[in-house]
Image (cartoon, rainbow, N blue to C red):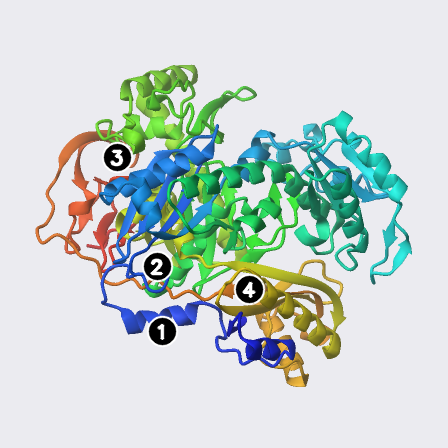
């Protein structure tokens, strides 16, 4: 990943980029500067904040999950505080500010005092994914090229299989395609045509556009998606259509495919653009409400929003491209793991973020995250560039149910969420969940309240599980243990798909467990995939890690152009394309006062006649003959690394289908130094009966209070370790200790 450190205000830097003759200072992205700073700054105290916050400022990251909202506050002296509150689906901004208030209280500050002293708020929102999953999106119209209105219905032939469960795949005969992203009556075919080189073949019909707009009121249209053929090569027709819509409907949200998904692929581009339109009005309302609330509470800065590409953008960009905020919280956790892990010599990581609703999994190899250009959202193919995160409905709130076709126990993907939540929350929930099972088994403490002072009702959980177990012929403990075994097996399968099926040996990775529910389950699913250690990063911060990851992120924006180049490459065209993209990136940096920046240049490449591309880092320096040879070599190496040595066909040459330039703000990395521990060793806080499946028995189990543990202590399972926001189960045959950085290290095969 080539990059140059630049100032967005520097004329000299701008001239260097325009000529594509830039001195590239970092050959492999952010990880090397991280290592250099770690060597220089290690030992300066825990989590020292550099220029990320002023001497009198705080930095706040807020991640909204399906069950809880997490806030992490980095104080001026670098210490980390956390606040948790129940998520509030009816208005997520309520939970947002409650979590910040809880964090402020832990610092002995009022909410207004904290926000007045805060210089940065970074937010990962679930507004988009919740609306898509529940179907509560806005009513959108789709403008498509005449004759291509059914692209979202044919689904490129993938509809039956995309996002289908294993049962649906096995019972293909009775499976069906999901409904298209919008009904056919909301698709308007517009006379126009541009060819693959951008030449206008058929002029756009103003009459068709006005005829479609005339129907908006009667159909209740709230947003418009415009996705014409080859618009990413020549966007003139989409731009004209957008102007006409905005001229007649000034308050209408308009989404254009050449801006949302500028790449080849009719179905995925149209779907992404339509979903972006469906989410637009919702996101505009939410962001305005949130930013107004922050300002009213004394915050003078700009709220930044997480993107699935792994960076932050200001509110105006988040409102324009809400599809880019979907899954931004889990992505922040992954990028934060790469950044923080590199400082602590954890370079190969399997991320496992288990919260209340989902398990999110990603792999980090040599401190670098991987990306994907397309993904599945609510069983639709969507072209959105994002950090490669796999997710399933497996969390503390996952509902246990009986499959009526075979009378077998199932768990998830449905979740009880925050409201009504698990039965044990006492909020009216009637469905048994994983949290209820953990409570009945003794993993969770019925006497220790959760966030918001939420007390757990173990008697209600027992009654619910007893009723479910009776239908299956199981007693209370057998049913609870079965629920946990099923959910852990599902999580094992997901991690195996993300590692083994992609050529990674889990034994060469450490499992990085975070999220509120990860501690109770990582010992089981980690052992199942064969990793040797599970690391819960930075002590209690693990339970709010995605919020901490948001605090680590810098402002980022990517600009892309599609090209059709085959080796030997047309270097003049490639150079001109890079120059144009870099100019756009620098203009964006200036417009948003990003200060010092770096540019990252990459290309999508493949062998001729292949369908799928491999992202390849562009070499440093000018685009010349040496550049071309270096690029081909980089592509062959990247291909072999992805698919195995010798899998490439170097004699065939290569093709470039897309080039992209990412501008990223340069922010000093938060160095992580050795943690401070209590001088005296912790003693057993109490004992409680816990059912351990390995022993097929419920036994009295020692419970420790995590903040009192010292690094020289080694706890052998079976043991429970409780922290303010999470609980860690040390299974029989496993051991737990703390390392010098404050990480909780769970060794899955106790060698002591």
Residue 522 position by quadrant: top left
Residue 317 picture location, percent across and down: 58, 51
Residue at 28% in and 22% down? 458
According to the image, label 2 marks what residue? 53
The label on residue 36 is: 1
Q: Are marks 2 and 3 in contact (CB under 8 Å)?
A: no
Residue lying at the far right in this picture: please name it: 202
Q: Which residue is mark 3?
A: 695
Give the number of the disc on residue 566.
none
| Residue visible at 51% across and 62% down in the picture | 593
Identify the element where label 4 is drawn: helix
Q: Residue at x 39, y 63 (%)?
A: 347
- Which callout, 1 or 4, points to the residue nearer the camera? 4
Q: Does the rendering let one see residue 520?
A: no
Viewer-closest of 658 and 631: 658
Do the CB atoms of the residues marked 3 and 1 lie less than 8 Å apart?
A: no
Look at the picture and state if 499 lies above or below 135: below
Question: Where 274 sits versus 316, above or below?
Answer: above
């Amino acid at each position: 990943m080539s990059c140059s450190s630049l100032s967005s205000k520097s004329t000299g830097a701008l001239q260097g980029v325009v000529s594509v003759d830039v001195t590239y200072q970092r050959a492999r992205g952010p990880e090397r500067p991280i290592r250099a700073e770690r060597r220089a700054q290690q030992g300066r105290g825990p989590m020292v904040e550099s220029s990320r916050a002023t001497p009198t400022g705080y930095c706040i990251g807020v991640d909204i999950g399906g069950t809880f909202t997490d806030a992490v506050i980095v104080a001026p002296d670098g210490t980390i505080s956390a606040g948790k509150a129940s998520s509030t689906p009816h208005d997520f901004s309520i939970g947002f500010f409650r979590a910040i208030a809880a964090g402020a209280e832990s610092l002995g500050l009022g909410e207004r005092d904290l926000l007045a002293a805060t210089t940065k708020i970074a937010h990962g929102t679930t507004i988009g994914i919740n609306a898509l999953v529940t179907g509560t999106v806005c009513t959108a119209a789709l403008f498509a090229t005449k004759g291509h209105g059914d692209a979202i219905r044919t689904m490129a032939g993938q509809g039956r299989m995309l996002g289908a469960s294993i049962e649906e795949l096995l019972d293909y005969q009775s499976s069906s395609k999901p409904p298209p992203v919008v009904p056919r009556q909301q698709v308007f075919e517009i006379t126009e045509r541009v060819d693959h080189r951008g030449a206008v073949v058929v002029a756009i019909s103003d009459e068709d556009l006005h005829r479609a707009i005339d129907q908006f009121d009667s159909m209740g249209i709230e947003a418009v998606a415009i996705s014409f053929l080859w618009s990413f090569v020549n966007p003139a027709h989409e731009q004209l259509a957008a102007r006409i819509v905005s001229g007649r409907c000034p308050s209408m949200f308009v989404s254009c495919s050449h801006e949302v998904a500028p790449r080849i692929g009719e179905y995925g581009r149209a779907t992404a653009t339509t979903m972006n339109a469906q989410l637009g009005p919702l996101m505009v309302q939410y962001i305005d409400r949130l930013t107004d609330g922050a300002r009213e509470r004394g915050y003078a800065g700009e709220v930044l929003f997480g993107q699935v590409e792994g960076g932050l953008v200001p509110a105006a960009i988040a409102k324009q491209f809400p599809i880019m905020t979907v899954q931004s919280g889990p992505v922040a956790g992954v990028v934060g793991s790469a950044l923080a892990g590199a400082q602590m010599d954890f370079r190969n990581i399997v991320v496992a973020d288990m919260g209340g609703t989902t398990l999110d999994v990603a792999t980090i190899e040599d401190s670098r995250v991987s990306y994907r250009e397309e993904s599945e959202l609510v069983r639709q193919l969507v072209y959105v560039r994002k950090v490669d995160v796999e997710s399933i409905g497996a969390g503390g709130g996952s509902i246990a149910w009986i499959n009526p076709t075979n009378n077998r126990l199932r768990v998830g993907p449905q979740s009880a969420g925050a409201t009504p939540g698990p039965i044990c929350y006492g909020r009216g929930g009637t469905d048994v969940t994983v949290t209820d099972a953990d409570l009945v088994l003794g993993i969770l403490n019925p006497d220790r309240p959760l966030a918001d002072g939420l007390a757990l009702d173990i008697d209600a959980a027992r009654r619910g599980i007893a009723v479910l177990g009776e239908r299956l012929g199981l007693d209370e403990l057998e049913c609870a243990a079965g629920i946990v075994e099923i959910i852990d097996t599902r999580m094992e399968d997901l991690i195996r798909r993300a590692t083994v099926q992609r050529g990674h040996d889990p034994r060469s990775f450490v499992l990085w467990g975070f999220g509120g529910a990860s501690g109770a389950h990582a010992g089981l699913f980690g052992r199942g995939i064969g990793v040797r250690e599970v690391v819960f990063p930075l002590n209690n911060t693990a339970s709010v890690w995605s919020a901490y990851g948001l605090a680590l992120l810098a402002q980022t924006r990517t600009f892309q152009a599609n090209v059709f180049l085959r080796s030997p490459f047309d270097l003049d065209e490639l150079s001109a394309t890079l120059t144009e993209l870099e100019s756009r990136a620098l203009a964006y940096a200036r417009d948003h006062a990003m200060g010092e920046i770096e540019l990252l240049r990459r290309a999508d490449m493949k062998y001729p006649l292949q369908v799928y591309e491999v992202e390849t880092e562009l070499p440093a320096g000018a685009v010349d003959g040496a550049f071309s040879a270096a690029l081909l070599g980089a592509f062959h190496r990247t291909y072999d690394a992805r698919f195995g040595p010798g899998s490439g066909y170097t004699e065939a040459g290569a093709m470039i289908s897309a080039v992209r330039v990412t501008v990223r703000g340069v922010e000093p990395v938060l160095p992580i130094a050795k943690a401070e521990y209590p001088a005296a060793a912790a003693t057993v806080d109490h004992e409680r009966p816990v059912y351990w499946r390995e022993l097929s028995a419920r036994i009295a189990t020692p419970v420790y209070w995590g903040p009192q543990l010292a690094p020289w202590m080694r706890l052998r399972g079976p043991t429970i370790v409780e922290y303010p926001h999470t609980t860690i189960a040390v299974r029989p045959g496993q051991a737990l200790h703390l390392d010098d950085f404050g990480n909780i290290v769970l060794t899955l095969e106790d060698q002591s």
